[in-house]
Image (cartoon, rainbow, N blue to C red):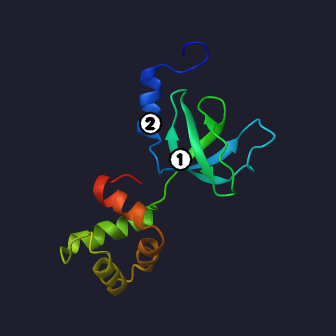
């Protein structure tokens, strides 16, 4: 920290830990314009001061300050959906980017959570397939 701001290494670490598109949940924020506790939002990026720029599901875009505000990263891919993705992959029946076929196989296997997840969260599904990150 330098003059209350994180150094370049810390900002780089925050950018890796909270990449654009990841989801966060607000736990605490001492600001009269803060969204309600428990509100979730999507990280748009981390600025040079180390603040997480968030688009809140409730509407606003108030930044989070690491080390001051309380928040947690939200897993978009649940443990159940992760296990179902891995089970479909293990069949070897399709390219995992052929989402319509993945949904057919998932439906045949009774993995209804995965069918719905792919329909509602295509970006998160692709991110998981590419990186394994949830």
The label number, if any, that marks residue 10 in the structure image? none
Marks 1 and 2, the one that precedes in the sequence: 2
- Secondary structure under tag 1 reads strand
Tell which of 43 and 82 is nearer to you: 43
Q: Tell me the residue at 47%/28% (across/down).
A: 11
The label number, if any, that marks residue 43 in the structure image? 1
Q: CA distance from mark 1 to mark 2?
A: 10 Å
Image coords of residue 10 (percent x, y): 46, 25
Q: Tell me the residue at 44%/80% (across/down).
A: 112
Location of residue 19 with respect to 39 vertically, above or below: above
* Crowdedness near tag 2: few (<14), some (14–19) or many (≥20) residues, C-alpha within 10 Å: some
Location of residue 13 with respect to 128 vertically, above or below: above
Tell which of 75 and 122 is nearer to you: 122
Q: Tell me the residue at 78%/43% (across/down).
A: 33
* Crowdedness near tag 1: few (<14), some (14–19) or many (≥20) residues, C-alpha within 10 Å: many
Image coords of residue 21 (percent x, y): 47, 51
Looking at the rendering, in which quadrant would you find the N terminus?
Answer: top right
Tell which of 34 and 111 is nearer to you: 34
The residue at which mark 2 appears reads as 15
- Secondary structure under tag 2 reads helix
Q: Is residue 124 left or right of residue 104?
A: right
Q: Tell me the residue at 30%/77% (across/down).
A: 102
Image coords of residue 116 (percent x, y): 46, 77
Looking at the rendering, in which quadrant would you find the C terminus?
Answer: bottom left
Image coords of residue 128 (percent x, y): 35, 58
Q: Is residue 51 left or right of residue 108?
A: right
Residue 101 lies in quadrant: bottom left
Location of residue 2 with respect to 89 vertically, above or below: above
Q: Is residue 62 left or right of residue 98?
A: right
Q: Is residue 88 left or right of residue 72?
A: left
């Amino acid at each position: 920290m330098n003059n209350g701001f994180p150094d370049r290494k810390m900002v780089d670490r925050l950018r890796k830990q909270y990449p654009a598109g990841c989801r966060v949940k607000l736990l605490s924020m001492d600001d009269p314009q803060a969204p309600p506790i428990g509100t979730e939002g999507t990280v748009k990026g981390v600025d040079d001061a180390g603040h997480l720029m968030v688009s809140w599901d409730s509407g606003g875009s108030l930044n989070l300050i690491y080390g001051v505000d309380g928040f947690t990263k939200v897993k978009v891919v649940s443990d159940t959906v992760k296990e179902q993705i891995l089970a479909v992959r293990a069949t070897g029946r399709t390219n995992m980017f052929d989402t319509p076929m993945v949904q057919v196989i998932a439906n045949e296997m009774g993995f209804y959570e995965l069918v719905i997840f792919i329909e509602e969260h295509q970006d998160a599904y692709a991110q998981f397939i590419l990186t394994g990150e949830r």
